[in-house]
Image (cartoon, rainbow, N blue to C red):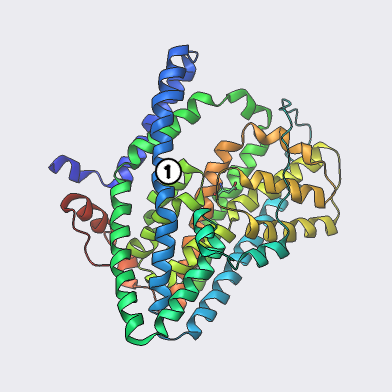
Amino acid sequence: MTEKKKLNLSTRIFIGMILGAVTGWIIAATGNAEWTRIWLVDGLFRVLGQVFVSLLQMLVVPLVFVSLVCGSSSLSDPKMLGRVGGKTVALYLLTTGIAVSLALAAAAIFQPGVGANPVSAEARAISEATPFTQVIIDMVPKNPVSAMAEAQMLPIIVFSVLLGIAITLSGSRGERIASWFQDMNHVIMRLVTVVMRFAPYGVFALLAILAATSDVADFLAVGKYVALVFAVLFLHALVVYPTLLTTLGRLNPKTFLWKMRAAMMFAFSTASSNATIPVTLETVEKRLGVSNRIASFTVPLGATINMDGTAIMQGIATGFIAQYYGVDLTLGQYLMVVVMVILASIGTAGVPSVGLVVLAGVLTQVGLPAEGIAMILGIDRLLDMTRTAVNITGDAMVSTVVARSEGELDIEAFNDPAAGESYEEKALETGEAPAA
Ligand code: ASP
């Protein structure tokens, strides 16, 4: 019991990841024997990994709905919602714009596509990205139940916020409903901590599958592209976010990044911003000190419309494919890529691989062959995992900065290294979730 206490959840998840990767490598190195493939990779690990991802996904819709109704029904000043919404969307667009510009610049300087000799992968059927006008129309759910059934984040957000506002306008009846939602929010957060207990095993399995099934030769074929995407992702997470956090929020970026590590590991393992919402929300509220009022709105919104990591991949991939086909992009085409990627990130759902599908739309717009995607398809999973970690870090950074500007950030909690950790641990050990 006491021994368990020493290892906090982040450390346990980290150990799970390392052991998983090592196990996968051993399986791959020993030639992927048939029994390991059938019993372990496609058997035990697949079950463990999928059950873990499903557990997280299971929480997303109820958590976003309940938490957002709670947040919007506790707004004392309804104008705040418009202000917070405006700031949040502006910052999301700004960070995505910076991300894709950095990526295009890096691709232009380092020329990853010149002389690349990728192994040809089979082309993938390219589906169309949703037009932006349709994204706006679809934001309002015709039927909130079907939006929830399909886990469509934007319509759920719109419905929850409107319901929350109606609750505040409904006097004592509204107060009764609001207090039900607050209790329910507590219960669901408690469920998040229960599911997180399973995380080290889940990430172990996901990483083992990845390591056992990836082929190093594929990575080497497009090595310069892979290296560049990694470099710009790190640059964005370790330089751009800290700069914004310091200048706009006057907050210590080291504290921020350190506290984000568990959420980043979840995002990395699942490659889905949506599935990570429960963990991002818990981290942003409990560890970083952002009020539920802000976080319940900014985190699910960010998971849906803010994809800086994805924008980086798309920018570099566009440069890579253009160079590979010997096409010189004009300044106008560069600008078109920036605008397209920003708009596409709004319409991109936070689920695995979708960034690659949306890239097809961007390529077509600038007149590049969408089949070029086939070259980077085989190695995309690892990049997808890494960019998802950046995506959710961006969501948390913007949430923190917006909360700070609204006086909705608990600075003491932000600066306290143990804030929220005790929440997690105490809840796990005693079964009692302390008050938020
Ligand atoms: N997997 C990413 C996410 O969920 C989206 C993508 O880039 O494919 O954030």
Q: Quadrant of the N terminus?
A: top left
Is residue 359 visible to the viewer in this orientation of the structure? yes
Residue 381: image x %, image y %? 57, 37
Q: Nearer the viewer, residue 405 or 304?
A: 304
Quadrant of the rendered image containing residue 51: top left
Seen in the picture, residue 249 relative to 124 is either above or below; the reply is below
Residue 205: image x %, image y %? 40, 32
Q: Quadrant of the C terminus?
A: bottom left
Seen in the picture, residue 130 relative to 210 is either above or below; the reply is below
Is the residue indicated by label 1 positioned so its CB lies within 8 Å of ligand 1? no
Residue corresponding to mark 1 = 54
The amino acid sitting under disc 1 is Ser
Seen in the picture, residue 60 relative to 160 is either above or below; the reply is above
Residue 395: image x %, image y %? 50, 61
Q: Is residue 350 left or right of residue 254?
A: right
Residue that appears at 30% across and 74% down = 179
Count of picture labels: 1
Residue that appears at 59% across and 45% down = 231
Q: Nearer the viewer, residue 56 or 383?
A: 56
Residue that appears at 74% across and 45% down = 360
Residue that appears at 58% across and 40% down = 383
10 Å crowding of disc 1: few (<14), some (14-19), many (20+): few
Residue 314: image x %, image y %? 68, 48
Helix or strand or loop: what does disc 1 sit on?
helix
Is residue 406 visible to the viewer in this orientation of the structure? no
Name of the residue lying farthest toward the left: 2
Q: Nearer the viewer, residue 99 or 56?
A: 56
Q: Is residue 333 left or right of residue 391?
A: right
